[in-house]
Amino acid sequence: MSNAPAPPRPYVSPRLGEVLALLPAAVSRFVEAEMVPNDEHWRQQKHVGHEIWRKAGAQGFLCTDLPAEYGGAGGDFRHEAVVYEETLRRGLSGFGQGVHSICAHYILNHGTEEQKQRFLPRMARGELVGAIAMTEPGAGSDLQGIRTRAERDGDDYVINGSKIFITNGYLAEVMIVVVKTDPAQGARGTSILLVETPNLPGYRVGRILDKMGMKAQDTSELFFEDVRVPAANLLGGREGQGFYQLMADLPYERLIVALGGVAAMEGALQATKEYVSQRKAFGRTVAEFQNTKFKLAEVATHTRIARVFIDRCIQDLLEGRLDTATASMAKYWITDTQQQMLDECVQLHGGYGYMNEYLVTRMFADARVQRIYGGTNEIMKELIARSLG
Ligand SMILES: Cc1cc2nc3c(=O)[nH]c(=O)nc-3n(C[C@H](O)[C@H](O)[C@H](O)COP(=O)(O)OP(=O)(O)OC[C@H]3O[C@@H](n4cnc5c(N)ncnc54)[C@H](O)[C@@H]3O)c2cc1C
């Protein structure tokens, strides 16, 4: 008789109740058929192209948590979470659905009724890929330092300036652009404009940036030279609301980054278990070494803690009580942990763990930026510290 303890009960996320039982399988089939076979090509060309966006929209997998009256699926964040998990546990970091959804949420939460009707149904169908353009060469963490200027001229705003590191920047067809409408007013002189980019005079996408990881993601520089947008594209219709609008949606954004971290750890753990059970050294499998067992035990434990925490955060979000400090804790702790765990998974792959054809290698490189974007982890600690009083 074996003395081995019974395997742990598989953790079933409490959010995946009966309503959601079929969604992961449907999304998984779509991802396997339409994304996995194209990922290598996408990484070579540095973007995923528009077609996959249209296909995901046609399947109803975009903007799943938008109300049906705006073209969404009428679901909630649990539905969104399924799509993030099915892509990111496979290391498919090129498809910037998180930023697309965040962009849609700015419009949903702060836009005028006319703006919601004009943009959201097309975003849900994947006809408009969304992006958020905040960061500039001279201002990232300290967004008060942005210089992109929008001046009112008749019925238009005229935008001049540049943005950098913009996720979905090359493919984006609608973007939230953070601008100064009154530079003398500091934060209160900041506004958000909705910019529809196709055939827009004066708008130019610069390089798709050459990054350490996320090779299929079209992170880009953007340039605005006397770009005219209708005054009706001012988010919410009132100047000076930009900072308030940005702050209000931060917990949602940080939850998405953290959830991606959990999904990556779960995918990496599975891939590493499979690898070490096949790889042989000194006449046995790598899985049989005590060090391997202990490392996998550590990765499994950290991954489970992260999963339980994120599920709790999702529940809080659904109940409208996810606060900024808790979302910041999730973003900081999970992404730091993600990087440590991915490092262990790479190590257990030996030299193959340094080769880009392996999932854990790509995930390791992708993980690094998780601690930087969405607000750096230092900024997260700043916010957590402030909440401690
Ligand atoms: C792949 C990628 C995708 C991105 N996608 C987008 C996007 O879609 N849209 C967008 O607008 N931006 C995007 N960004 C930009 C990202 O959000 C910024 O890079 C990030 O906020 C940090 O800004 P920064 O690069 O200017 O660094 P800085 O703000 O210059 O920070 C440099 C260092 O100083 C530290 N620091 C700054 N302030 C403090 C402080 N008060 N206390 C302690 N330490 C501090 C930072 O933590 C960091 O370690 C993306 C970046 C990358 C790399």
Image (spheres, rainbow, N blue to C red):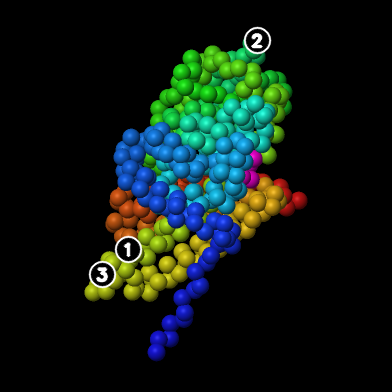
Up the image or down, 37 lies above or below 103; here it is below
> Could you tell me which secondary element the residue under label 3 belongs to?
strand
Look at the numbered disc 2 and give the secondary structure of its residue. loop
Q: Earlier in the sequence, mark 2 or mark 3?
A: 2
- Does label 1 or label 3 sit earlier along the sequence? 1
Left or right, 215 with reference to 108:
left
For the residue carrying disc 1, how many other residues have a C-alpha within 10 Å: few (<14), some (14-19), or many (20+)?
Answer: some
Nearer the observer, disc 2 or disc 3?
2
Give the mark, 1 or 2, whose residue is nearer the N terminus.
Answer: 2
Q: Which residue is mark 2?
A: 154
* Structural distance between the alpha carbons of marks 1 and 3: 13 Å
Which residue is disc 3 drawn over? 281
What residue would you read off at disc 1?
275
Q: Is residue 351 left or right of residue 75?
A: left
Q: CA distance from mark 1 to mark 2?
A: 63 Å
Q: x, y percentage for residue 225? A: 51, 15
Mark 1 or 2: the one toward you: 2
**Rendered image quadrant of residue 54:** top left
The kind of residue tagged 1 is Tyr
Please tell me whether mark 1 or mark 3 is closer to you in this view: 1
In the rendered view, tell whether residue 261 sits above or below residue 276.
above
CA–CA distance between discs 2 and 3? 74 Å
Which quadrant holds residue 295? bottom left
